[in-house]
Image: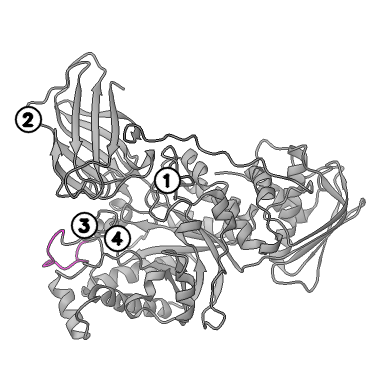
Amino acid sequence: MTLVLEQSWSPDGAPQSKGGMFRLTIHNHGPAPIHPHALCLSSMTRIASDTGMEGARLDRRFGNFHRLIAPKDLLIAAGGVWVIRIMDLTHEPKNRSQGIMAAWLETDTGEIPILTGDLEPPPGAPREALAALPEGRIEQPLGLLPWPQQVEISEWAAPRGLAFSADLAEIAALHQRLFPFARSVLSRDGRPVTCQRAALPPEGYALDFTPERITLTHADAAGRRHGLIALAQISHAALTDPRFREPLRGRISDHPRFAWRGMHMDVARNFRTIDEVRRAVDILAWHRMNRFHWHLTDDEGWRIEIPALPALTGIGARRGTGLPLLPQYADPSSGQAGHYSMAEARALVAHAASLGIEVLPEIDMPGHLTSLLAAIPGLTDPDEVPDSYRSIQGYPNNAVNPAMPAVYEVLGTVLDTVCEIFPSRLVHLGGDEVDPRSWQQSPAAMRLAEAEGIAGEGVTHRLQALFMRRMHQMLKARGRELAGWDECADGGGVSPEGTLLFAWRSVEKTAELMRAGYDVIATPGQAYYMDMTASDSWDAIGLSWAGTATVEKTYGFEPAEGLPEDASGRLIGIQAGVWSEMLSSRARWNAMVFPRLSAVAESAWTEPAAKDWLRFVALSPLMPQL
């Protein structure tokens, strides 16, 4: 590329600046001068709407997309630069990844891409190398993660693998998909495995090892599958890493701590192919996790086919220059596109079920719906003041209006298709991050509020609760129950009956929701969000609104700490949150998700007394990645 963007941040912006200042320097390394009309960029740290600016003028903000108008007579000479100072930002960036992620110039001859460097800190700021994880410690040569509840092995042996059998065929195929270059865990000389059923805790299994055979005792079909995967893990580790062996004599007794052991995967912000999603499900099975929470819609994209509403994927699944949805994050000017057909989604659900994993679909509402609003007219009040509120992600008026009858017709059609595809008892309807100013300049919404006796402070959240209660009834009419983020309890909330809430905003939310009578999944951003930075260093990557989630912090977090014993609600399980704003590539996905996903998996399965940080560090490199 002939254009390179150098970007730096300083806390010294305009007076009363909220987030300091960006200095952008565009270098023209080409042989000819360039006359730019505008600079387009996407930045995780957004430009404040009323900012002062030197060297350009803010023309448009849409989410993380910004268009800056160049001075009329600007010419970037060959070897020259264009310098822009942006004097106020929405918040202070905390590391090199929170600045501009992609940029290009608009010129007379078309768009010119710009190579974008990391965001540089102020001069003199300390730069620290990312701390490596400790080497770890292996006291028993057992390659098994999550670690079982009880291990009593008296003798170890060199790897032989497992004998061919119908019982092991499915698990051997899973191993082959996850490790295509590894030796098979099945061997002509391997020990035979005998399966038998007995009274054990739900999903529990026991493995008895002798030189002649392995006996797998299991509670149910899930326990049988977990035991077979554990055997495959043990053999894989012994066959690929000289630190590990196979048990020759002894017993492993095991069962999961929590019934819900999940991972949320956002494919709306950055799309992942169906093959990548299928591999993610395989990875969950290898970790003995049993819930896949599929975040299918958001402002940035609608990813599931609804045949009766083709515009949802025809318009809402595409973003790019000149489209209703503009490029975001690390998109080039051409943006990105992608969605899943009904057939692909059904096949994914069937594949997950074959591995004991339930797929929880999420259609986020009433906010986070810019993609829906771009595709389907009539879901907002035509008399609402345009751009009267913006979501925390920077999207104007991004919530469907609870006073518009068409909203319930369209969402009813969506739910019909979702219920047709997904057999899960639960459907996740989001309910998060509705801006507190939403609908307050909508005459129709205010008339609805007056008719319902809603007035004064908190009118938006009470209208949202009214909307969510109606959606809850629509789910019940379809034989389903509601799952949602913890905001579903705000403003009067939805009934705890037939509801499962996911506590994400703080570690205290789990206890608060349980006291209110809700069953809860703990997924606090402070520990279980994989998009959070794992280091305080400027040279780290990731978001930081919930703080720093180091691998050790994620592993050591105890979700049951401080929970009330007398609450009518229950802690059902825990879940990792894989949000994708920063995960623009498979390499980024792997770098941020692992080994923290493995840490959540062990916390979901293994009782605290059986966990060991240094052992986990030694075992986690054995786990597969996307």
Please state which of the two labelled residues, at mark 3 or mark 1, is closer to the viewer. 1
Q: Earlier in the sequence, mark 3 or mark 1?
A: 3
Q: Is residue 380 magenta?
A: yes
Q: Mark 1 points at which residue?
A: 542
Which mark is drawn over residue 591? none
Disc 4 marks a residue whose amino acid type is Leu
Within the image, what quadrant is residue 564 found in? bottom right
Q: How far apart are marks 3 and 1 (CA)?
A: 24 Å
Mark closest to the chain's N terminus, 1 or 2: 2
Residue 320, quarter of the rendered image: top left
Q: Which of marks 4 and 1 is nearer the N terminus?
A: 4
Question: In terms of depth relative to the viewer, which is nearer, 467 or 517?
Answer: 517
Q: Marks 3 and 2, how far apart in space? A: 29 Å
Would you name the residue on which mark 2 appears?
72
Dot 4 or dot 3: first in sequence order is 4
| The C terminus - image quarter | top right
Give residue 373's position: percent from left, percent from top: 24, 60
Left or right of 413? Residue 500 is right
Label 4 to label 3: alpha-carbon separation: 10 Å
